[in-house]
Amino acid sequence: MTAVAATIFILTYAGVALGRVPGLMLDRTGIALLGAMAMVLFGVETIPQATAAIDIPTILLLYALMIVSAQLRLGGFYTWVVLKSTARLTHPRSFLLIMMALSALLSAILANDIVCLAFTPVLALTLYSANMNPVPFLLGLAISSNIGSAATIIGNPQNMLIGQMGNLHFGQFLIWCGPPSIISLIAAYYLICKVYKDRFMDHGRVEDLPKHKPWPAFNQWQSIKGLVATAILMILFFTPIPREYSAIAIAGILLCSRKMRSRKILELVDWHLITLFCALFVVIHGIGIYQIPQSIMAFLSRQGIEVRSLLMLTGISTVMSNLVSNVPATLLLIQFLEPSNHVQWYVLALSSTYAGNLVLIGSIANLIVIEQARIFGIRISFREHAKTGIPVTVLSLFILTIWIWAMS
């Protein structure tokens, strides 16, 4: 049965790495779900074992934070933030700085994918109307949202997973991961300014703006309601109350609205991502039953590769995050970490998130920005992204390396 579990795991992660199965309309989530089903159908684990493998607190935290973020999106808060910052459009570098800072801050508090989903259409249309080159600003949005999300436990799905599975303290995580993320953000800003120093303005005149779906209008009450809920949630995260309890309590209060239908809020929950999490929990548990992760670690040690070495962990995490995406990579790598050594968990969180900037397909946030921009006729190629994505990632990982050395 060990061979069966290993085969299913290898096929699942190979499929996740490719992102598709030739001849079938399967994406990464569908492939992971098939892997989880195979673990049960081939007798690797029973249905009770599979359901028990799903870390419910992590899923609840992810689900609840999506509801909080949906409240702010439907209240038009994200739209209002972008439109207010356009007062600096006449000073492209200042506008880029403000936009990247806002994106990073909001991504640290809320899910970075939601921030990109809400910001991109407004930003693209605004820049299009102002006859400016939208590419550096949209790249800045994707890059800053990734870097900013690395600073907190709730900034992105893999951090939520790391925070929950490692039982990490919210404040201590922020203290360790915040400084390198701030420095990386500043470095990314200056790098984008250097790459696009003479190309912030697009002198080609745009006659007809593409049609777009109307985004939510700003509703002061709904936005304030969402902001107050977020502020209370941040305070609760610094208390001994389990994060998932705090999050579902706030999410439940937000669902009790007289004006906003709960259906509209729930439609913005990323069920695709939640399904991916659940499926991967089952697949990883299947190989864990037969001690396969321990066998892999023993093999790597014999080859001189120590996964628990902070620098080695940084490199392995970066490579794996770009092969299979950061959530599947994180779920696998946490099997090798020492529960009592929190620094290993911090390094995994930072490296797996920074790695998302390396190539276009490195993170969901990148893909959201690219796909949303395409609606407006804005094409950002793999090569165009790489001009900033690769050096930004190298700089971020270098900063992380220095930080590891300084904190040792």
Image (tube, rainbow, N blue to C red):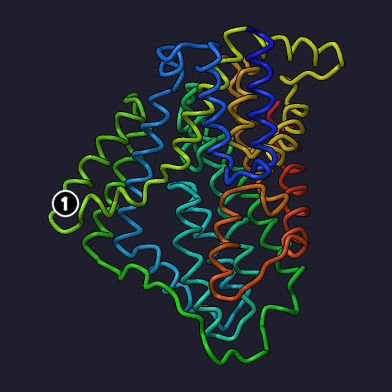
- In front of the other: 287 or 172: 287
Compared with residue 4, is residue 330 higher up or lower down, i.e. above or below? below
Q: Relative to 310, is 225 on the left or the right?
A: left
- In front of the other: 97 or 27: 27
Q: Relative to 376, is 19 on the left or the right?
A: right
Q: Residue 278 placed where, x, y %?
A: 46, 29
Compared with residue 202, is residue 407 higher up or lower down, i.e. above or below? above
Most distant residue in the right direction: 303
Q: Relative to 232, is 27 on the left or the right?
A: right
Residue drawn at 20 percent across, 42 percent down? 253
Q: How many marks?
A: 1
Question: To which residue does mark 1 refer?
Answer: 257
Query: Which secondary structure, mark 1?
Result: loop
Compared with residue 145, is residue 298 higher up or lower down, i.e. above or below? above
Q: Residue 321 placed where, x, y %?
A: 68, 38
User: Which residue type carries mark 1?
Assistant: Ser
Q: Relative to 34, is 66 on the left or the right?
A: left
Quadrant for the C terminus in the image: top right
Q: Residue 37 placed where, x, y %?
A: 51, 24
Quadrant for residue 323, please give it: top right
Most distant residue in the left direction: 258
Residue drawn at 45 percent across, 53 percent down? 114
Compared with residue 370, is residue 282 higher up or lower down, i.e. above or below? above
